[in-house]
Image (cartoon, helix red, strand yellow):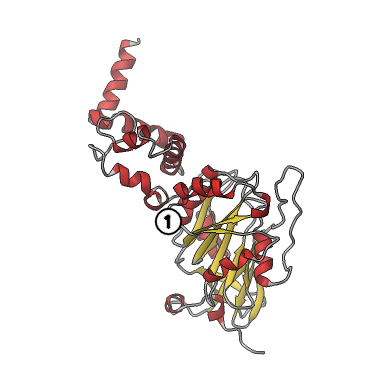
Amino acid sequence: MEKINMEDYGLSDRFLAESKMYNLSIGRIISQEKGSYGLITENGEFKAQVTGKLRYKSVNISDYPAVGDFVMVDENKGNPVIHHVLSRKSAFIRKAAGTSNKDQVVAANVDTVFICMSLNKDFNLRRLERYIAIGWDSGALPVVVLTKSDLCSNIDEILNELRDVALELDILITSSKAEDYASLKKYIKPGRTVAFIGSSGVGKTTLINKLMDRDILATGEIRKDDRGRHTTSKRELILLPEGGMVIDTPGMREIGIESADFSKSFADIEDLALLCRFSDCTHTKEPGCAVKKALEDGILSGDRLESYFKLKNEAEYEGLNSRQIEKQKISRIFKDAGGMKKARKYVKNKNKYNE
């Protein structure tokens, strides 16, 4: 049987060097579904599971293998067994829906993240800001992909709004009914991986089928409310005929922030903050605040500033329990009054006077 060239699947010197630490085979996770993993090695495609030791050592969901991960496997005992996850060069991570203090790797070791949003009723500028902040933080290059342009009558108006949010990111406009998906191809090269991220029904799977030049993934029709139907039920890495790989991901109804890169996603506000009189300015009541001045002059929109505050707050408090959150808040409130020591004295005196 002819060996599979793992370089086609993104195997690079970086991962090969780390793999020398283990007397095991190297593979890449190509699918993930309910505790089992699709795995490819130079010997073929297999179903695999993690060892009990790896399961025991995994504290968080993100410690488990994810689609795109390179892993060390034992191929000698029937179905391969995954022993180690090699360090990731990038990872798109979100807070797992419906859980607390847990983060979930949506796609690992990707070079580019296609943030997909449809140009119909699903379009949401604030949600896009959230995706971009996480996209920059992933270590991959985020690119905005607008889908279903044939359903939009005000593209120019949306693009004007989008430029204040996407800043210097590439914005690609696509349609399932036109041959304009070719703009995606410049990011898809042999050995490189692109992850398609976005809400349910925005057309991610349709675009992948176009790139494959055949329907290998199921798609859904547009519903009566103008939203696409959710079809992808698992994460999957697919090798394209012309080289390069794409990762299809299920749509996300909600996307909590585990961490985010505000220096790039909100560079306009972060740059303004450098001009504030005080280095620890909160941009709320301090004199000499450049952010407030930009807001008053109409240079910065109130909605964008509110989104910035919201995401900053979420990223700061995610992963903390209620007591830790309260401590953080009190520390912030009293930072100009001597910190926690004076805060405790204040609370003690307040309780004394109320007796």
The foreground one among 41 and 108 is 108
* Disc 1 secondary structure class: loop
Q: In the visual, does 41 lie left or right of 289?
A: right
The foreground one among 44 and 20 is 44
**Amino acid identity at mark 1:** Glu
Q: Where is residue 37 in the image (x, y as percent from the top left)?
A: 64, 66
Q: Position of residue 314 (x, y in %)?
A: 45, 41
Q: Position of residue 343 (x, y in %)?
A: 29, 26
- The picture quadrant where one finds residue 51 is bottom right
Quarter the N terminus occupies: bottom right
Quickly name the residue at label 1.
Answer: 168
Q: Where is residue 89 in the image (x, y as percent from the top left)?
A: 44, 66
**Position above or below: 177 against 307:** below
- The picture quadrant where one finds residue 148 is bottom right
**Position above or below: 264 against 37:** above
**Position above or below: 59 against 246:** above
